[in-house]
Amino acid sequence: MSINFALALGVLNMSSMRAGRVMLVLYALHLGAAPATVGLLAATFSAFPALLSWPAGKLADRFGSRWLLMVGALGGGLGTLIPYFVPGLPAIFVAAAANGLSLSIYNVSLQNVVGLMSTPESRTRNFSNYSLSNSIGSFAGPLIAGFSIEHIGYPAAFLPLALLALMPLAMLVIWGDALPKGTGRKQREGGGLRDMLATKGVGKTLATSSLLQTGQDLFQFYLPVYAHGAGLSASAIGVVLAMNSAAAFVVRLILPRLIAKYQEDKVLAGAFFAGALSFMLVPFFSSSTALSLLAFAFGLGMGCGQPIVTMQMFSNSAAGRSGEALGLRMTVNHLTRVFGPVIFGFVGSAFGLAAVFWVNGLMLGGGGALSRTQKPSSAND
């Protein structure tokens, strides 16, 4: 099967997931939620990925990814319908949990499919293209959310979003049997968690990955809060967030050449520093144009990070344990993201939203310093 099938699944899933997250956050703000409540909502998105990504990766190694992808698509689509039928904050939190459940199952399975369908020579290109597909979805998602809200309002906008989320399910039913199969082994080879963590480069990759994803998530959640407070409309906020994804798409077009010229560790360090500077400048501006430019700059930096750390984890994994390694990365990321938004939510309530952007900018700068010591990964053939 062509890698393009996996990329199409990625575009559709990321579009629905990003649209759902933006829509749920804006709906919560529409209902009067405070920054601390938005922080709790962000943590809810990450609760299931923190618990289930690693087990989902193990299941993908053993049984293959098709049925896991189908379960993830179905759960995401049905969860999105909850606010449509039951308006209010409790329904928003349930839908956020369903969104996270879909993510925990779907993303790790699809990342593993991309790796298994790649050769060592094509791995960088395929993971970069997979990240490009995610950028397309991340660009489309906020636009879908913003314009749907403005044209049909809350909570009706969740209905077309649910249909979008269920489209991958139909594709997997028809064509999914051609996806790579699992090993069929009940007992994995190569030792347990301690053995995996002892693998060279894995620990630092996990640390830089969690910082990267925390920064990206906080930007996605708190920029709408900041922009809403500055008086921007839902469609304007959608455009600002879409600019972040557009920049990630642009930089991922040239990512293989950047890695070939500067190596992974230097590109990753530059990504962190660019993201940190953009994040810290947000509180000084309030116009949609300025925020769009900062979102674009942030996307140029952070758009390099995800494909690099994903490649590093896949390359460092033992044979037959790639899904488990990718699941472990997502688990560590989301454990950080469960607590990070809650902490930053209270920071925002106590010291203002500017403190959220400045403190997280310092954290991203620390990630840049750490990644400078990270050596490029070698392919695990």
Image (cartoon, rainbow, N blue to C red):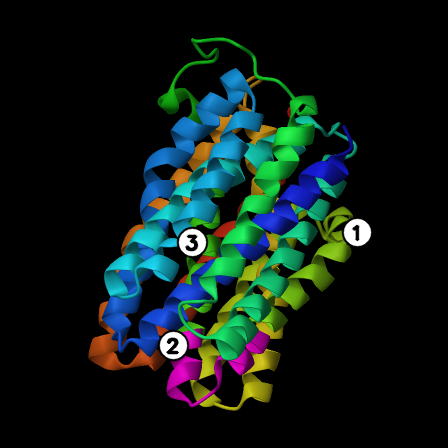
Mark 3, residue position: 80
Lower sequence index among marks 3 and 2: 3
Tell us which disc is closer to us: 3 or 2: 3
* Residue 181 lies within the magenta run: no
Q: Give the structural element (helix, strand or loop) at label 1.
A: helix
Label 2 sits on what residue type? Val
Which amino acid, by three-letter code, is at mark 3? Thr
Task: Name the mark on residue 257.
Answer: 1
As drawn, the residue found furthest toward the front would be 85
The x, y position of residue 56, in whole percent, is 43, 29
Q: Is the Cβ of the residue at disc 3 closer than 8 Å to that at disc 2? A: no
Report, in whole angstroms, how far the alpha carbon at label 3 lies from the one at label 2.
21 Å
Q: Up-down: is 284 above or below 24?
A: below
**Magenta residues: mostly which secondary structure?**
helix
- 51 with respect to 303 (left or right): left
**Which residue is more in the foreground, 167 or 107?**
167
- Counting other residues with Cα less than 10 Å from the Cα at mark 1, is it few (<14), some (14-19), or many (20 or more)? few
Quadrant including the C terminus: top right
Near-viewer residue (7 or 296): 7
Q: Which residue is mark 2?
A: 225
Instruction: Where is residue 346? Give x, y as percent.
Output: 22, 69
